[in-house]
Amino acid sequence: MLVEENKSLKKLSTFGCDETCHYFTSIDSNHSLLEAINWCKEKNKPYLILGAGSNVLFTKSFEGLVLKMGITGIKKTNETATEIFLTVGAGENWHHFVSYCVQKSWGGIENLSLIPGTVGASPIQNIGAYGVEVKEVIASVCAFDTHTNDWITLQNSDCAFEYRDSIFKKNKNRYIITSVDFVLKKQAILRTDYGAIKDVLHEKGIKKPNLNDLSSAIIQIRTSKLPDPSILGNAGSFFKNPTISKSIFEKLYTQFPQMMAYPISDNAYKIAAGWLIEQCGWKGIRKGMVGCYEKQSLVLVNYGQATGKEILAFSEEIIQSVLKKFNVLLEREVNVL
Ligand code: EPU
């Protein structure tokens, strides 16, 4: 096992903050994962699993071993008349996997095109975009359970999937995901109901889109609204869209009839955090090297040399101003370390 010391995490996370970790190693198999975990136990060091680093903010150096998940591979394990079953290594690039499936005309994840990150990270926060969440296509998740020292397979219903949440996120560091089993459809049911998708398809004059048209439309929407982390450091949505009760929604709505919100159950509404933040005047605001992205205020950006602490402080200012104006508490979506 090759362990590097005092490695910079700047290139290992999409925010590009220049923090370091004491120890670093790459994982390319279940065997090397066990070796690394045992190394930590022997030396009594904490560990941190890193995928593409697209949902973390490092605010200080990590005093343990960073394990870069690199188990790759897309394997077809079964096929029926209507479905395809795939097992995908946790270290596979998510968008590469989506493109592979779109190319094969296997439907289910095309709306999740261009989401940064790895396949292994996708169940952790149940990634979602344009009306689809990854939980809809996950059959099961294979992981190493560090509490019981066992390899386990969690079925979809065991994963406690919710909006940007799962058993993996609730039990931080307990499960190390090594592969994910997906079920995709041979006859894709395209989900084009999201407003922006309809607009792009209409602009392009596409009346009967195929998987590739839909994936391309989503790539176009994302690239027009979200900053490319290889150019401008960011971790996608920094905050979650908050859920509020119907009674609070009704009160707020009389005060702010323009509020972007939609019901998610009989008694709860989800509000667009981007709208709340924009209303507080943050959209496009820059303070030093940190900013609130000009085209989507849910996204915070690093203009170059921002430290994780500066980004965190900026996010706290946003949380406080939204709380003051709307009495709604925003929660961070990004993992702050
Ligand atoms: N809005 C504003 N101002 C803004 C941003 C948004 O008024 O600065 C309004 C929009 O006009 C729209 C509504 O808020 O009416 C929703 O905006 P958008 O469609 O851009 O989606 P979102 O709720 O802001 C969520 C996800 C994104 C995902 C999009 C598309 C979360 C936290 N974010 O954003 O996911 O791509 O929907 O489905 O749920 C991510 O998680 O990193 C991410 C980018």
Image (spheres, grey):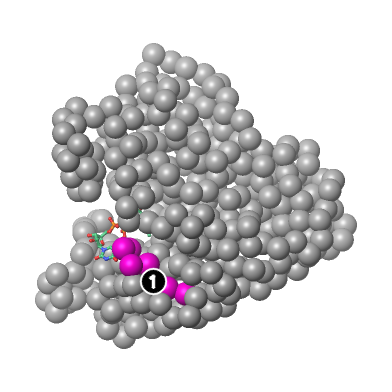
Q: Is residue 292 magenta?
A: yes
From this view, report whether residue 242 is shown above or below residue 200.
below
Pick the front one: 99 or 137:
99
- The span picked out in magenta is 290-296
Q: Residue at x 55, y 45 (%)?
A: 118
Measuring from the top left, give residue 194's x and y in whole percent: 23, 46
Q: Quadrant of residue 279?
A: bottom left
From this view, report whether residue 51 is shown above or below residue 106.
below
Q: Quadrant of residue 11?
A: bottom right
Measuring from the top left, give residue 42's x and y in whole percent: 88, 57
In the image, is 64 to the left or to the right of 298?
Answer: right
Q: Residue at x 57, y 28 (%)?
A: 74
Q: Which amino acid lies under the numbered mark 1 shown in the image of this protein?
A: Cys
* Mark 1 vs ligand 1: CB below 8 Å: no
Residue labelled with disc 1 = 292
Q: Residue at x 42, y 22 (%)?
A: 104
Q: Is residue 109 magenta?
A: no
From this view, report whether residue 244 is shown above or below residue 97.
below
In the image, is 84 to the left or to the right of 207?
Answer: right
**Residue projecting furthest to the bottom:** 324
Q: Residue at x 23, y 29 (%)?
A: 209
Q: At numbered mark 1, what does the secondary structure look like: helix, strand or loop?
A: strand
